[in-house]
């Protein structure tokens, strides 16, 4: 799996490169500013672009804007954004109307080498990864008379883990329940949120989007 990295801090960028190389990824390009990142993604057509939110030239949200541009112009490229802050709006802006092939993680997740590598693979394969801290904030801001209010505490846990990109098996292992129990919760979530019928992966993405729109 080919990766382009956009990170202006040289030490962190090299650390990510070393981690990914050790995990079997091919880092095809590195960029220290947002315009260069966009150029290199266009030139190398990677499977995943890993992007820091704050990058030169303005050091505000240049990286996020570059990530959104990449998703628009190169829809086949997965985008994993790294941020120092748990900003829900960043995740919402990044996902827009399609949660496939997108991730948003706090930078401190990079220290979990195995988990970070798995997140990159998941995004590269068209999956969705949202940082648990961000998801928790979103669930904590549920609005009144919202369908999310009809979810049971266990269903909210399952939805939170779905938003993190976990499979039913992964959710079952995390909650120490059977996969069949998770399947029942997922079906109930689809029903309560009014998610249309379709493939399992498609419905999971729709459920995550519905969750994001209503927070």
Image (cartoon, rainbow, N blue to C red):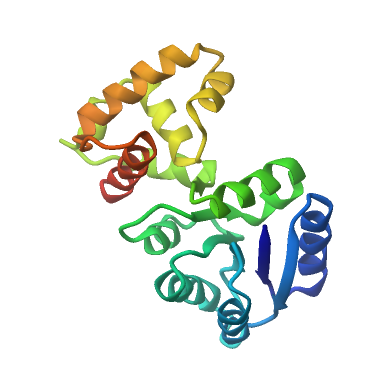
Residue 60 place in picture, x, y as percent: 53, 78
Left or right? Give the position of 150 relative to 166.
Answer: left
Counting labels gives 0
Seen from the viewer's position, the closer of residues 122 and 116 is 122
* Residue ID at (67%, 64%): 3
Residue 153 visible at all:
no
Q: Quadrant of the N terminus?
A: bottom right
**Height in image: 205 above or below 27?**
above
* Residue ID at (56%, 14%): 176
* Residue ID at (50%, 31%): 167
Residue 171 visible at all:
yes
Q: Residue furthest left?
A: 145
Residue 14 place in picture, x, y as percent: 82, 67
Give residue 40's quadrant in the image.
bottom right
Residue 121 place in picture, x, y as percent: 62, 49
Left or right? Give the position of 15 relative to 60.
Answer: right
* Residue ID at (63%, 76%): 44
Residue 210 place in picture, x, y as percent: 27, 44
**Height in image: 155 above or below 88?**
above
**Height in image: 57 above or below 89?**
below
């Amino acid at each position: 799996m080919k990766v382009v990295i956009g990170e202006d801090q040289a030490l962190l960028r090299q650390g990510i490169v070393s981690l990914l190389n050790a995990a079997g990824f091919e880092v095809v390009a590195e960029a220290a500013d947002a315009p260069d990142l966009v150029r290199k993604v266009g030139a190398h057509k990677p499977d995943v672009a890993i992007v820091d939110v704050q990058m030169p030239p303005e050091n505000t949200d240049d990286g996020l804007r570059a990530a959104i541009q990449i998703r628009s112009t190169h829809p086949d490229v997965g985008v994993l954004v790294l941020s120092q802050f748990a900003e829900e709006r960043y995740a919402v802006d990044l996902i827009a109307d399609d949660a496939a092939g997108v991730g948003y993680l706090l930078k401190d997740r990079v220290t979990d080498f195995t988990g970070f590598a798995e997140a990159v693979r998941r995004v590269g394969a068209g999956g969705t990864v949202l940082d648990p801290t961000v998801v928790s904030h979103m669930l904590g801001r549920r609005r009144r008379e919202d369908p999310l209010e009809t979810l049971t505490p266990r269903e909210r846990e399952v939805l939170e883990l779905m938003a993190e990109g976990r499979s039913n098996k992964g959710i079952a292992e995390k909650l120490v329940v059977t996969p069949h129990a998770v399947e029942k919760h997922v079906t109930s979530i689809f029903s309560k949120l009014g998610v249309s019928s379709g493939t399992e992966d498609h419905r999971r993405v729709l459920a995550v989007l519905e969750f994001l729109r209503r927070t």
